[in-house]
Amino acid sequence: MGREQTKEMIIWTKEEYLKFADEMMDKPQAFYAFEILYWCGLRVGELLALTPADFDFEKSTLRVNKSYQRFEGEDIITDPKTPCSIRTITMPDFLKEEIKDYIGMLYGIGENDRIFDFTKSFLHHEMKRGSEAAGVKKLTLHQLRHSHVSLLINMGFTAVAIAKRVGHESIDITYRYAHMFPSEQTEMADKLNIERGGC
């Protein structure tokens, strides 16, 4: 009683995301923003607060220590959602090179200037445009975070390691994000069939 029913969450598989990303390449700001959201699992406010000073390209890391929101026409930078949200994330090499190139294209940007100078509404619009063009199911921006967590679980990483990466206070939260990829049910049935000695 009183227990919240678990709602089915929609995610993109890696293949679906890559189709979407291909459609984003004509708008570099949107493309690089979505790359960070999908491959690092940031919250949108964390993404929009990033500055060049948050990246260490020698160590391939990005630091999350603030969040951005637009309130009554003003840009507001606040602390992240929870103390556990303050973290350092190691980027895959391809993403490090992409973001290094992207920041290099931002003429006259200061170390503490936002690298994505737009709001959530721009990303909502681009998400809709890209998913329609790619022919993939429509997600919310936050469901990219679900997709990142599900991808890591599918790759075999532990809930503890994933919780640290995405800034969850508890691994229980991480487990709630754990959604099986569409093919996994079939793969499980096939493996159980082999275990039993079926064909």
Image: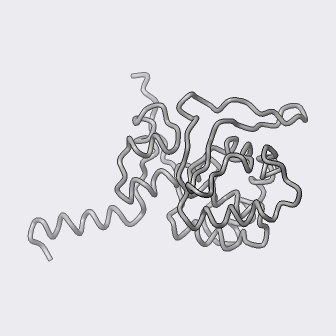
Q: Taking 192 as reference, is 118 above or below it?
A: above
**Quarter assignment of residue 25:** bottom right
The residue nearer to you, when weighing 80 against 102, is 102
| Residue 189, horizontal then vertical, whole percent | 24, 64
Q: State how many labels appear.
A: 0
Farthest residue, direction left: 197
Q: Taking 2 as reference, is 97 above or below it?
A: below
| Residue 164, horizontal then vertical, whole percent | 46, 40
**In screen coordinates, is 120 left or right of 136?**
right
**In screen coordinates, is 57 left or right of 189?**
right
**In screen coordinates, is 39 left or right of 99?**
left
The quadrant in which the C terminus is found is bottom left
Kindly identify the residue that appears in the image at 77 percent across and 66 percent down.
28
Q: Taking 193 as reference, is 160 above or below it?
A: above
The quadrant in which the N terminus is found is top left
Farthest residue, direction bottom: 199
The residue nearer to you, when weighing 64 against 177, is 64
| Residue 137, horizontal then vertical, whole percent | 60, 63
The residue nearer to you, when weighing 150 against 106, is 106
Kindly identify the residue that appears in the image at 64 percent across and 71 percent down.
135
The residue nearer to you, when weighing 86 against 46, is 86
Kindly identify the residue that appears in the image at 56 percent across and 28 percent down.
83
| Residue 117, horizontal then vertical, whole percent | 83, 50
